[in-house]
Image (spheres, grey):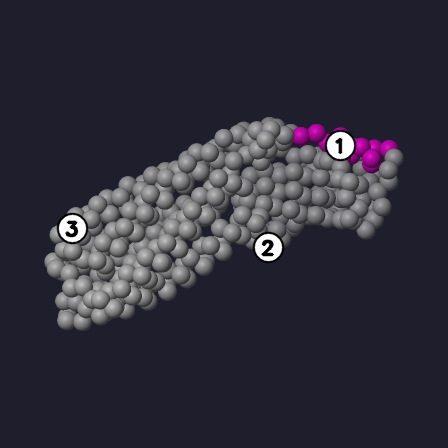
Amino acid sequence: MTAPGRHQHGAHGDHDHHHDHDHPATGWRRWVPHALTPHSHDAADRIDDAIEGSARGIRAVGVSFAVLLATAVVQLVITLLSGSVALMADTIHNFSDAFTAVPLALAFLVGRRRPTRRYTYGFGRAEDLAGLFVILMIAASAVVAGYESVRRLVDPVAPTHLAWVAGAGAVGFVGNELVAQYRIRVGRSIGSAALVADGQHARTDGFTSLAVLIGAGGTALGAPVVDPIVGIVITVAIVGVLWTAGRDVLRRLMDAVDPAVVGEAERVVGDVPGVLGVTGVRMRWIGHRMHAEIEVDVDETAPLREAHATAHRAERELVDHVPGVASALVHAYPGHR
């Protein structure tokens, strides 16, 4: 098992698939892939970075949970006083959004566990599974919002205490938007697609709160039909958010990365002195950490120690200069100038 921050050079049975040139099978050239041993002096830094990222994620979901729970409790009290169906639906949304913090927090905690012989890449995938749960919650919000809007369009309900209802809608919108911005900012900072998706979920619930506010205003002006119409419009907006968040989470589960990041990794490694060419790049997100596997060609006449140093520099350059990369596995092969 290779600890984060180390690099290794290993032979591959299908390496010829990646190269058009022949590799000599005798001498040091045959042993280069095996002889360049891992380094561990920067492994502690990489592990500390991962733990810090998880800690920031846990802090983000904890703070947002407290804000959304307080928002939902305020709305629940006003719902009981006013009898507003729209506000009741929005209150349910806010409670559901608050409690998505639970699986996310568990995912961040599980992701901090060190790799085992069974889970050799660690437990970062728990974040992506939590992201799927968040996507399901956004979908549920869209269904509930759409259903309530159509139902109120067919069978209008005139709530009381409109000023309080409008105030509760405003509180819901502001609370959700603040939480959305916080979650999305932290999620993007640490590279967590699940936390970004949960921020987008909070934003959808902010939209439903806005619908409550607009609906209360329409009712006060003698046009209660405004409420369900706005609700339907906001349902469409929630579906749009669902598409974006779902796409990002599913791409992460399929090991997709931004092609620009792959290009940057090729450029950074290609610029390392001693690297003749980059012949293969594989990158994947594991939770909020990215792992890279790079195949490079080095001068076949170079001493073993020099080839070793070249591969080591390539690994360090990747981790230091490509955003998101926390660990790298560098495979060196002899190539022709």
> Quadrant location of the N terminus?
top right
Distance, label 1 to label 3, CA atoms, is 70 Å
Instruction: Tell which circle, 2 or 1, labels the residue nearer the N-terminal end.
Output: 1
Local crowd size for mark 3, using a 10 Å CA cut-off: few (<14), some (14–19), many (≥20): few
Q: Residue at x 44, y 43 (%)?
A: 130
Looking at numbered disc 3 in the image, what kind of residue is underneath it? Leu
Query: Where's residue 225, x and y in %?
Result: 22, 70
Element assignment for label 3: helix
184 relative position to 255: left or right: left
Q: Position of residue 131 (x, y in %)?
A: 45, 47
Q: In the image, is 335 to the left or to the right of 136?
A: right
Q: Please give the range of residues in magenta.
A: 27-38
Question: From the viewer's perspective, is residue 164 above or below residue 104?
Answer: below
Q: Is residue 46 visible?
A: no
Q: Amino acid at mark 1?
A: His
Q: Secondary structure at mark 2?
A: helix
Q: First in sequence: mark 2 or mark 3?
A: 3
Name the foreground residue: 26 vs 305: 26
Does residue 39 sit above or below 61 in this rendering? Answer: above
Residue at the spot of label 3:
80
Q: Which residue is mark 2?
A: 259
